[in-house]
Amino acid sequence: MSNNINGDKLQEAIDYYMAHGEKDTCDHFGFKTETMSRYLREARLRGLIGKDVNKIMRDIREQYTDDELKAISKGGRLMPGVANIPIIDFEGKRIRVGHISDTHVGSKYFEENRLYQAYDEFRKESVDFITHSGDVTEGMSNRPGHIYELDQLGYAQQKDKSVEVFGQWTETDIYAIDGNHDRWFMKGSGAKVVEDISRELDNFHFIGHDQGDISLKGKATMKLWHGEDGNSYALSYRLQKILESMSGGEKPNVLIAGHVHKYVNIFERNVYAIGVGTMQRQTPWMRGKRLAAHVGFCIADYWINDKGLAKARETWYPFYT
């Protein structure tokens, strides 16, 4: 054996050298430079490394930091003049959520059977929880003719009907905010109908007036939003303006919006935003205003890791009414 170098020790040293370079190998094994050179010559004679590997490894070690080398090993490409390139981790804990909004319980146009169909789909897809983005009830306004659009009159009937229909879902929690229709009872008599519904159902939780936040594994925030603004000609415009109104530190990772009865999905200001439609078919008032109703619901998957929201995917389930 040339130079009396043990074969196992030679292989171990060359393997370490291939991974860490000459300097680290000398430090690790306590080699002098002359010893390292002798090991490299012997390794070439035995065909363990090519003639140019030493130079290639040395050049790589000199040009990149340990973090950059880790990035290269994961598939990152480092361009000349670029110090770092982030390697994004798209993996994480998946959370599956059923999204509904604007049920308008108490309205003749509330699609009760459609809500139960949504429950069936939520069961089949094993959602982790359900959100409701406001206008749980229809309320009672002073608008002429509104009373003729109701099949449940007043606070007590609409609250009781809501307890009945949401009580049909027992598998997971429901997190809800109130909307402008719900707050008609508050304005008229001080009654907080959504909050009162939550007191009668153990798994139905009221989380805020007009907006409320849900923590996703403590790493990301989902905000439910209702609002009292109106429709926009371009469906995405309303969500864009909502997100523009939030300062950087207030932005959620996910925004789930109700109120205008429209389905839309956008990614704006690094926020994944969904308008989740309605469970109320088009009313005479909406038809008179030439406003369509997108009747349906969403199921969305969110992957959460230590960095926050890693990725998202949603499916819209339309009812053609």
Image (spheres, rainbow, N blue to C red):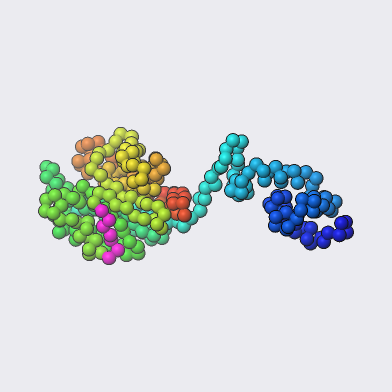
Question: The N terminus lies in which quarter of the figure?
Answer: bottom right
Residue 237 can be seen in this image: yes
> Percent from the top left, x then y, of residue 132?
30, 53
> Percent from the top left, x then y, of residue 54?
75, 46
Magenta stretch holds residue 287: no
Q: Residue at x 70, y 42 (%)?
A: 59
Asked whether, in this view, residue 1 is left or right of residue 286, the answer is right
> Percent from the top left, x then y, of residue 141?
14, 46
Could you tell me how many numbered marks the image carries?
0
Q: Residue at x 22, y 56 (%)?
A: 194
Magenta span main SS: strand
Q: Residue at x 44, y 51 (%)?
A: 308
Residue 96 can be seen in this image: no
Magenta stretch holds residue 203: yes
* Quadrant position of residue 265: top left
Asked whether, in this view, residue 30 is left or right of residue 292, the answer is right
Give the magenta part as a residue range.
202-208
Asked whether, in this view, residue 95 is left or right of residue 166, the answer is right
* Quadrant position of residue 230: top left
Q: Nearer the viewer, residue 52 or 30?
A: 30
Q: Residue furthest right?
A: 1
> Percent from the top left, x then y, of residue 153?
14, 54
Q: Residue at x 59, y 48 (%)?
A: 67
Q: Nearer the viewer, residue 213 or 6?
A: 6
Q: Residue furthest top?
A: 233
